[in-house]
Image (tube, rainbow, N blue to C red):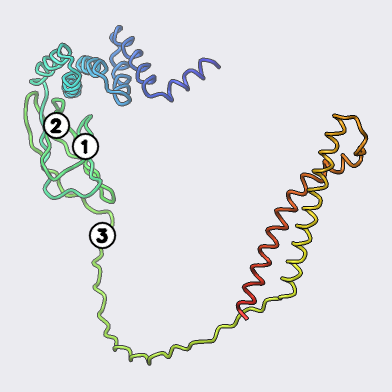
Amino acid sequence: MIAVALMTILSADPDAEAARLFAEARAAMKVNAWDVACPRLEASRRLKPTIGTLLNLGVCLQNQQKPSGAFDAFTQAQALARSAGDEARATYAARQAELLRPKVAWLTLTPLTTPRPHTRLVVGSHELEASASPVTVPVDPGLATVELTAEGHAPKTLCVELAAGGNATLELPALESLTPEVPVAKPAVVLTPEPAPLPRATLLTLPTERLPVHRPALVAGLIVSGLVLIASCVGFVWSRTTADQAALQQTTGMLVVTRSQYLTASTLHPLTFGGLVGGLAGSIAFGALLAGERHGD
């Protein structure tokens, strides 16, 4: 179970997976198992193209008698090493690419017409997007195949025989559409008479009506708010006085306040703050509404 979990974690990390594939490929190369090593190096290159991976891939493909793939790998390794400032490996990769150049054939693809969107070319191990400009790719000597595909069109496969160090030009034909194009008819022109002008509208101004205000309710609310405010003031003064007498009683020992009075004052004192705030706010609000109603009259 631990091994399976470790493999899952490694496969989720591209760098770790690339390192694992590279290590397996190197072990296979030591016993000349090129058919095992080359696919692993190619997979490692797709995950993380490093200089070492590209150099080993070039050596592996060279031993598989695939000079075009080896030439590409050494060329990419040279460019990557130059950008990294690794002149030793860049020089080695350039020398290996030059040694392979005479063994590689070169195929130039020239499209006859402007390619359609999503047109793709597969030339040996190369997969590229077709363009309106000629493109030259290295291929292995012998029979080279070119697969031309486009969305909604019938694919075509072309073949050309090439010798080592040779050059050839292949003109790409136009692909046949799978669904014939149907000409779109132009819509008929329909003349419509101009509409008659609309009569001018007359803007009506409607008198606004005020909503009725219940003045007795406002007066009652003002009275209740005033009573709450007065009761809260009385309760605040009484609870505060009782608390002060209780504190004096603890100091002098004289019995001034009973325990029940002290408990009532302690409970009532915090409530009086809410009553003061509510009564004051209600008095102000109802008073303002009554003042506005009288002003409206």
> Could you tell me how far apart the alpha carbons at marks 3 and 1 are, in whole angstroms?
27 Å
Residue 140: x and y in percent read: 16, 25
Q: Mark 1 points at which residue?
A: 128
Question: Which SS class for mark 3?
Answer: loop
Q: Residue at image x 62%, y 73%?
A: 292
Q: Mark 3 points at which residue?
A: 180
> Could you tell me how far apart the alpha carbons at marks 1 and 2 are, in whole angstroms?
10 Å
Q: In this view, does 42 lie to the left or right of 241?
A: left
The answer to whether 23 is drawn above or below residue 210 in the figure is above
> Could you tell me how far apart the alpha carbons at marks 2 and 3 are, in whole angstroms?
33 Å
The answer to whether 11 is drawn above or below residue 133 in the figure is above
* Amino acid marked by disc 1: Leu
* Amino acid marked by disc 3: Pro
Marks 1 and 2: CB-CB under 8 Å? yes
Who is closer to the viewer here, 109 or 11? 11
Q: Residue at image x 67%, y 76%?
A: 213
The disc at residue 102 is none
Residue 92: x and y in percent read: 14, 12
Q: Name the residue under label 2.
A: 137
Position of the C terminus by quadrant: bottom right
Residue located farthest toward the top when viewing the structure as drawn: 30
Marks 2 and 3: CB-CB under 8 Å? no
Of callouts 2 and 3, the N-terminal one = 2
In this rendering, the count of numbered labels is 3
Q: Residue at image x 44%, y 88%?
A: 203
